[in-house]
Image: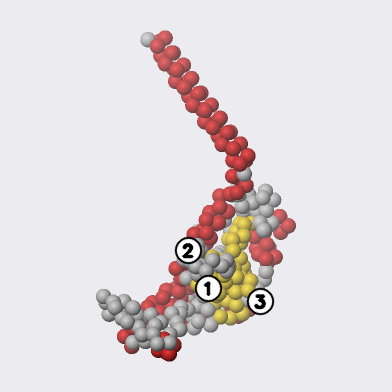
């Protein structure tokens, strides 16, 4: 019985060593293959010397990649969508060389839903994260910025524009001039409301204004929550207008005036390292 147990133990030990050796060999091969194929370089954010990732929010904030393409085949203008932005955020968090994230903003806004998704992602970042507004951070772009721990903006920047619009161009007079007639064919009374080729009825306007009020109040609520400010204070500012960086600071829509060097000093303080050790990945 004792001999049997010894043989059994030896068998188990041999099997364990074999499995462990196979695992180590597989790991070494995988690491070598990734380095040889350039895979690690393709997913790494840092080049080994920089430690602050930069995530841009530029152009229109759109719901998904390609949403701003017009089908003309022309290169679309720069834009930002939540999927790409959150993917960049996750990549930065996964890179062991990255110690902070700077979200650099130059945008007049766009989709409020896309901005809400981005803001939520920024709020839950596992690394110190700051937003830097350069030329403009307005409307949906400002909502996205409020997800950052701190917001820095240029004194010359344009900030705010808290509000929602559904305005559109009425084509009815032009259609009449061109001999075109709108033919309504819908299964429900309001199915084609807001179509620019038909006149807007009083009932349809009421529906749109109802929705605008709901969206507006939600926008105000989320900005107030993200900025830890009274909702009444944000409501007073939410007339759709934007303001220079200095006035935005006075109204607590941002935390500091400055540029990327101001952000560098903020990261140095957060990470408790010398300023010269803060290196942006760009």
| Quadrant holding the N terminus | top left
Tell me where residue 244 sits by quadrant: bottom right
Tell me the residue at 53%/73% (across/down). Answer: 109
Front-most of 119 and 56?
56
Tell me the residue at 65%/73% (across/down). Answer: 154
Question: Is residue 69 visible in this depiction of the protein?
Answer: yes
Front-most of 168 and 224?
168
The percent coordinates of residue 16 (x first, y second) are 48, 24
How dense is the environment of label 3, judged by Cα within 10 Å: few (below 14), some, or many (20 and up)?
A: many
Tell me where residue 5 sits by quadrant: top left
How many angstroms separate mark 3 from mark 2 (CA)? 31 Å
How many angstroms separate mark 2 from mark 1 (CA)? 14 Å
How dense is the environment of label 2, judged by Cα within 10 Å: few (below 14), some, or many (20 and up)?
A: some
Question: Is residue 227 visible in this depiction of the protein?
Answer: no
The percent coordinates of residue 102 (x first, y second) are 61, 61
Tell me the residue at 63%/78% (across/down). Answer: 246
Tell me where residue 133 sits by quadrant: bottom right
The percent coordinates of residue 257 (x first, y second) are 65, 73
How many angstroms separate mark 1 from mark 3 (CA)? 19 Å
Q: Which residue is mark 3?
A: 155
Q: Which residue is mark 2?
A: 64
| Quadrant holding the C terminus | bottom right
The percent coordinates of residue 78 (x first, y second) are 58, 67
Label 1 vs 3, first from the N-terminus: 1
Q: Which residue is mark 1?
A: 109
Q: Secondary structure at mark 2?
A: loop
How dense is the environment of label 1, judged by Cα within 10 Å: few (below 14), some, or many (20 and up)?
A: many
Outermost residue, front direction?
179
Q: Is residue 55 above or below residue 23?
A: below
Tell me the residue at 45%/74% (across/down). Answer: 219
């Amino acid at each position: 019985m004792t001999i049997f147990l010894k043989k059994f133990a030896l068998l188990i030990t041999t099997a364990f060593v074999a499995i462990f050796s196979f695992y180590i060999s597989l790991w070494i091969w995988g690491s070598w293959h990734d380095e040889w194929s350039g895979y690690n370089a393709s997913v790494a954010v840092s080049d080994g010397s920089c430690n602050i990732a930069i995530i841009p929010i530029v152009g229109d904030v759109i719901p998904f990649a390609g949403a701003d393409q017009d089908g003309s085949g022309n290169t679309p203008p720069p834009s930002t969508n939540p999927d790409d932005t959150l993917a960049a955020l996750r990549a930065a968090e996964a890179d062991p060389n990255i110690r902070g994230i700077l979200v650099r903003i130059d945008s007049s806004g766009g989709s409020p839903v896309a901005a809400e998704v981005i803001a939520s992602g920024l709020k839950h970042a596992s690394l110190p994260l700051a937003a830097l507004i350069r030329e403009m951070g307005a409307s949906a772009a400002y909502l996205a910025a409020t997800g950052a721990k701190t917001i820095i903006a240029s004194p010359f920047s344009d900030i705010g524009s808290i509000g929602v619009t559904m305005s559109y161009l009425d084509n009815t007079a032009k259609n009449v001039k061109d001999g075109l007639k709108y033919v309504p064919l819908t299964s429900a009374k309001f199915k084609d409301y807001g179509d620019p080729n038909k006149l807007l009825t009083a009932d349809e306007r009421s529906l749109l204004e109802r929705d605008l009020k709901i969206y507006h109040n939600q926008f105000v609520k989320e900005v107030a929550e993200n900025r830890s400010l009274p909702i009444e204070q944000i409501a007073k500012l939410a007339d759709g207008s934007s303001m220079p960086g200095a006035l935005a600071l006075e109204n607590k829509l941002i935390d500091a005036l400055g540029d990327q060097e101001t952000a560098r000093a903020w990261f140095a303080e957060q990470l408790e390292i010398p300023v010269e050790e803060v290196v942006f990945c760009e």
